[in-house]
Image (tube, rainbow, N blue to C red):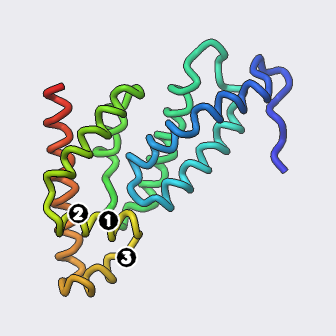
Amino acid sequence: MMSVPPEDNALSTEEFVQLLTSEQGRLSSYIRMLVLDHHAASNVLQETNLILWRKVADFQPGTSFAAWARQIAYWQVQAHLRNQKRDKHHFGEELVEQLAEASVNQEQEDEMRSALRKCMQVLGHPELELLRWRYEEDTPIGTLAQKLGQTQSAVKSRLSRVRKSLYACIQQRLATT
């Protein structure tokens, strides 16, 4: 059973739970943007929530809870990436840092989602199917390779090219707004 945050903290348990609950959707979106595997993103969100609970005494009432929570989520994503470094189809720490910096507030996150949707409309059907299989259905690279009649290396390269293309397109669209 989790212990209740310290009594001497100026933020009550009820206030903390209200702040955390109101921030869950944005935190989840932020983490999913940085960790494309939805199962891993869910785990990172759970770990982030635990850290937030444990560190509630460190939060300074009157400051931005969203910024504080997002910073902790960022460090949890970084820890996840360090643990996944051997798996080369995940974003590197530098790219995650760039994405994290680009999503300073909700308005920018909305702009990024809008840009991603527009950029995905430009992709061909084969690329969209590949992304859907890999990220929505969580299909392993080996299974994709068999399904497509390609080597695992070719599938990884193809996914990498699609992600880089999407990233460049998003950056270009954000630069024009």
**Nearer the viewer's eye, disc 3 or disc 2?**
2
Indicate the quadrant where residue 56 lies: top right
Q: Position of residue 146 (x, y in %)?
A: 26, 87
How far apart marks 3 and 1 lie (CA) works out to 12 Å
Q: Which mark is residue 65?
A: none
Packing grade of label 1 (10 A; few <14, some 14-19, many >=20) is few
Instruction: Return the residue at label 2.
Output: 128
Q: Amino acid at mark 2?
A: Leu
Q: Position of residue 80 (x, y in %)?
A: 47, 54
For residue 123, side relative to residue 135 (left or right): left
Q: Position of residue 169 (x, y in %)?
A: 15, 44
The residue to which callout 1 is attached is 132
Asked if residue 164 lies left or right of residue 93, the reply is: left
Secondary element under disc 1, as helix, strand or loop, is helix
Count of numbered badges drawn on the protein: 3
Circle 3 or circle 1, nearest the eye: 1
Choose the circle earlier in sequence order: 3 or 1: 1
Residue at 61% x, 31% y is 22
Pointer 3: what residue? 140
Bin the neighbour count of mark 3 within 10 Å (Cα to Cα): few under 14, some 14-19, many 20 and up. few
Q: Is residue 173 left or right of residue 142?
A: left
Q: Residue at (79%, 29%) from the top-left corner?
A: 13
Instruction: Give the answer, above or below, for where 34 lies relative to 24.
Output: below
Residues at marks 2 and 1 touching, judged by CB atoms closer than 8 Å: yes
Q: Quadrant of the C terminus?
A: top left
**Dot 3 lies on which element?**
loop
